[in-house]
Image: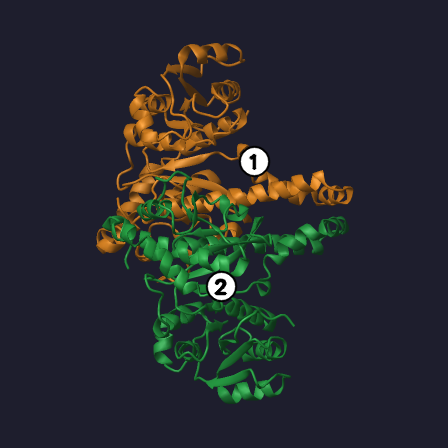
Chain colours: A green, B orange
Amino acid sequence: MPAEAGPRITIALDAMGGDHGPAEAIRAAAGLSLSRRDLGIVLVGDEPLLTRLLAEERYDPGTLSIRHAEGFVPQGEAAGSGLDARPRASILEAAAVVASGAADALVTAGSTGAAVHAAARRLGRIRGVRRAALAAVYPTERPHGPREDPFALLLDVGATLHCDARDLVTFAVLGAAYARAVSGNESPRVALLSNGAEPGKGPDEVVAAHGVLSRGGVCDFAGNVEGLDIPKGTVDVIVTSGFVGNVVLKMLEGVAELATDLARDAYARRFLWRLGLTMLGSGLRQLQELTDWSQYGGAPILGFEHPVIKAHGRSRAPAIANACKVAAKVARQHLPREVERALARVQDAIEGLPAKGRSAGPA
Amino acid sequence: MPAEAGPRITIALDAMGGDHGPAEAIRAAAGLSLSRRDLGIVLVGDEPLLTRLLAEERYDPGTLSIRHAEGFVPQGEAAGSGLDARPRASILEAAAVVASGAADALVTAGSTGAAVHAAARRLGRIRGVRRAALAAVYPTERPHGPREDPFALLLDVGATLHCDARDLVTFAVLGAAYARAVSGNESPRVALLSNGAEPGKGPDEVVAAHGVLSRGGVCDFAGNVEGLDIPKGTVDVIVTSGFVGNVVLKMLEGVAELATDLARDAYARRFLWRLGLTMLGSGLRQLQELTDWSQYGGAPILGFEHPVIKAHGRSRAPAIANACKVAAKVARQHLPREVERALARVQDAIEGLPAKGRSAGPA
C-alpha cells in the first residue's frame, strides 16, 4: 500500500470520455480508494450511471465522491464546438471542480482537444505562460535519470501547432519542471529539435529560442538535437512546435506498430521463425512493450496552475489509476511557482526578441 | 550490359566531394564507360589528380572526359560562403557543364547544401517553380508501384525550411513526376503530411495547399497523411516543409541504426541469441538493408531544368554509378515540361491563395 508523504491530494476524474466507457474509470477509482488513502477522487459524469457502476465495485466511500455532468465530447469531434454544445460536459465540470479548489488535479481519458480547451476555459494559466503544451513520454534507446527510465519527454505534440520563440522557451521550462517532478532527475537535459546541431540552424523561432535558453538560468540546456536523437534519447526533454511534435509522435507509434506486425507475422509463419523469435524473447518483448500505453502515466497538458493528465483513450482501469497517481505526484510539487520563477529570469530576453522570431506563424 | 533506349545521355559527375575522395567517382565512371554505351560521363575535378587515378582503371576513353575544377566545399562547411570562396569549385563547374548543354544531368556525392546552391546559381528553374526541393527515397512497410518497390518518396527534406502553400503544391507536382520517372508507377499517390487526415487539419499553408491539390489536374492527390503513415508507406509520395522533412528523415535513420545496434548487440551476446537471429535471417537482413544507402539511387534535388542527383557522402563506386544511372533515366523523360503543364493548370488557384496561406514563414 504505497502512499506519498503529505496531505491528501484530490483528483477530479472525468469518468465519461474514454474508449471503454465509464466502467474503467470507476474501477480505477474504486481500486485507488482501497489502496491509496492519501488520494481522494471526485468522479465526474452521469450521476445515475456512475452510482450504479460504483455499486458493483468494492470501494472506500470515505475518499470517493460523484459530481454530476451531462454529456461528453466524443473522440474525433471538434473540441471547441463540442464543448460549446455541451456546457455541462464531464471534462468542463471536472475542470470546474479543480478551479473551485475542491480538487488539485484533473485526469481524463477523453478527447485530447476537449481536455486542452476545457483546461483553457476553466483553469488559470501559470504567470508568464501564454499557450499550453501537450507533452508525451516516449521510449528511447538510452536510459534517463537516476532510475534509468527508458523514456524521454517530447513537447509540444499538438496543443499549439505554430510556436514562436517565446512558446518554445516556455515549453522548455515546463518540460524540465515536469520531467524533474516525475523522474526524480534533479536536472533534466533539455534540447530544441532542429535540422542541425549548430546554434544558427533551424527556423527563426528555433534560432531565437536557442539564444534565450543559452543565457542560462532557465533549464539545463543542451542546445539543438536532430531527428536522429529522438529514438536514441540523447537528452531528457525535447522541445518543438505542436505540428512537428505530433508528426514525430505518430511516427514513433507507427514504428512501434511495425515491430509488433513483424513479430505477429513471424508467429503466423514457419516453425524456425517462431523458434527464433522465442530465443530473441526479451528483445522483442521490449519492443512490443513500447506500444503498450497502459504502462504509461498519460500525457500531461502543461501550462496551467493545476496538473492536467490526459490518459490514452484506450486506457483500461490500471492505466487510468496510474494517470491519477502521476497527477497526485505532480500536484504535490508546486511546479507552477518553479516555472514562474524560471520564466521571470528570462523575461527581458523574451521581450527583446525580434518580432520575426516572436511570431513565426499565426497566433 | 543493360542500356536504356534513346540517344546518349551525358552526366556531369562532381568527382571531388564524397567522403572517400575522387577514387570512388573515377571507379564508378570507368565501370559505366565499359558497361553502359548509352551514357557519357564528364568527370569534374582536379585534372592532374583525376587523370592519374583514371590511368589506374580499365575504361573506354570514347565516353569519358575530364573537366578541370579547383577545390570543393567540404561537408559541414556553410555552402553559400564556401562556394563564394571557391568560384571554380567542382560542383559549380559540374553545374556549368550541364548549363552549357555539354551534359544532361548532374551527380555529386559532395555537400548537399553546396549542390543545392550550385544548382540554384548555374541551372535554370522550371517555369512556375520558385524554390527547390531535396527529396529522399526511404524504406516502407508496404510495397509501391508495379515493381513492388519497398520505398516511398519524401520531400522536402531540407532545401526549403519554410514552405508556403505554393511551395507545397509545387513539391507535390515535382515529387509525383520524379516518382513516376523512377518507379514505372504511372500514377503515384501523393499526400500532404499533417496532424490529422481531415482537410482542415494542419498549419495554414498545409490547409491551403490541400485546397489547391483537391481541385485535381495536378497529381493523384490522396489528401493528408499523418506521422503513422510514414513508416507504413500508405502513399507513394509525402510532401512537407524542409524542416519537418529533415527531422522525419533523420528519425528514420535513427530507427534504422537502432535495428542495426540491436542485431550487433545480439551477436556479441549468447549463443541462443545468435541462433535466434540466424533463424530470423531474412527479416533482420531486410531491416539492415534499409540502412545501406549504397543500394539507393541518391536523393534528387528537384525544381531545375536538368536532373540533379545527390548521392550519399558515404557512397562507394557502386552507389555513385547507380546515381548516374538514375540521373540518366530521369533525363530521358522530359519531366520539366510535364511539371510546367501541371503547375499551369493550378496557376489561378495558387495566385488566389490568401497571403497568410501563401507565406507562413520568412521567404
- The residue type indicated by label 1 comes to Asp
Chain at numbered mark 1? B
Q: Nearer the viewer, residue B244 or A311?
A: A311
Image: A114 above or below B349: below
Taking the image as shown, residue A245 lies to the left or right of residue A131, namely: right
| Residue at 25% from the left image edge and 51% from the top image edge | B358
User: Which residue lies under the disc numbered 2?
Assistant: A299
x, y (%) of residue B235? 47, 51
The answer to whether residue B170 of the structure is visible from this angle is no
Q: Contact (CB < 8 A) between labels 1 and 2?
A: no
The local crowd at label 2, few if under 14, some if 14 to 19, many if 20 or more residues have their Cα within 10 Å, is many
Q: Nearer the viewer, residue A86 or A115?
A: A115
Secondary element type, mark 1: loop
x, y (%) of residue B189? 44, 51
Image: A194 above or below A186: above
Whole-Å distance between the Cαs marked 1 and 2? 36 Å
Secondary element type, mark 2: strand
x, y (%) of residue B133? 36, 40
Q: Are marks 1 and 2 on the same chain?
A: no
Q: Nearer the viewer, residue B331 or B15?
A: B15
Q: Nearer the viewer, residue A295 or A345?
A: A345
Image: A356 above or below A200: below
Q: Quadrant of residue B171?
A: top left
- The residue type indicated by label 2 comes to Ala
x, y (%) of residue B231? 52, 50
User: Which residue lies under the disc numbered 1?
Assistant: B292
For the C terminus of chain A, the image quarter is: bottom left
Q: Quadrant of residue A159?
A: bottom left
Image: B338 above or below B74: below
